[in-house]
Amino acid sequence: MTLIAAQMYTLREYCKSALDIAKSCAKVKKMGYDGIQASGMAKIDPKEMKKILDGEGLLMAATHVGFDELAKEPERIIAEHALWNCNYTAIGGYAFAEWTRAAIDKFIGDYNAVAAKFAGSELKIGYHNHHHEFAQIDGLRPIDLFINNFDPEIWLEIDTHWVVRGGADPAAYIEKVAGRIPCVHFKDMSLKYEGREPQFCEIGDGNLNWPRIIQACRYAGVKWYIVERDSGEVNAFDSLERSAYNMREKLGLF
């Protein structure tokens, strides 16, 4: 079964209070999304969040939580996610002081130690990539070091746009982490304007090979297709609606 979620970071400018979040969730539901990923929103009482989700008939697909929170407050985070019936969280990246092999190895060890705090719970922690994880260090890509050396219980939230920005193939990386990718970030990239930086755009309106990516997702056992656009000229709500339309009409996902 294909489940589609809206990454609420896309709507961060419209989620600055509990009331904003409720209004945004109502709009997301009307677009045809099954759930949301909590990220970039105002702080909200977990029970209020559950009330909003239940009221709209939305699921909490996943969340983003900072490294320090995961390390220091695992019990609270586990309890909140249990309230939402949500089994997946991830850090949105990691602020390395410098990208060196020693720093990467230390982070891997530290994050494995954090993962141990969640062992035995229903909540799985993961890692979301950007493009810098694909810049080679000593002939190796950090993303490959993560895949090979993270605790196997740590899942990988592959972001399609950032993989391409990093010079790699998102479908290949999705397949590489088969069985460890319950949620994927669907994010397109436009290369329409020669001489300009790649742009974020709506799913199906850019240059990514979505049929191939979807094939890889099905092979890898992806449960949630999470739609995100970091920025762009199109209004954020219109962007999510356009992406949902294209995923349904062009790509046949739901």
Image (spheres, rainbow, N blue to C red):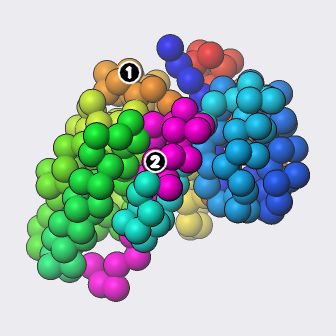
Q: Are marks 1 and 2 in contact (CB under 8 Å)?
A: no
Q: Position of residue 71 (x, y in %)?
A: 37, 66
Q: Is residue 53 visible?
A: yes
Which residue is found at the position 46% from the left and 48% from the top?
Answer: 78
Against 61, is 63 above or below? below
Q: Is residue 96 magenta-colored? A: yes
Mark 2 sits on what residue?
78
Q: Point out the stretch of residues depicted in magenta.
A: 76-99
Which residue is found at the position 53% from the left and 19% from the top?
Answer: 2
- Mark 1 is surrounded, within 10 Å at the Cα level, by few (under 14), some (14 to 19) or many (20 or more) other residues, namely some
Q: Is residue 129 magenta-colored? A: no
Against 52, is 77 above or below? below
Kind of residue sitting beneath label 2: Ile
**Closest to the observer: 154 or 170?**
154
Against 68, is 41 above or below? above
Which residue is found at the position 32% from the left and 49% from the top?
Answer: 118
Mark 1 sits on what residue?
218
User: SS at mark 1?
Assistant: helix
Q: Position of residue 53 (x, y in %)?
A: 73, 35
**Label 1 – label 2 distance at C-alpha:** 28 Å
Q: Position of residue 116 (x, y in %)?
A: 24, 54
Which residue is found at the position 64% from the left and 39% from the top?
Answer: 36
**Closest to the observer: 143 or 180?**
180
**Closest to the observer: 69 or 159?**
69
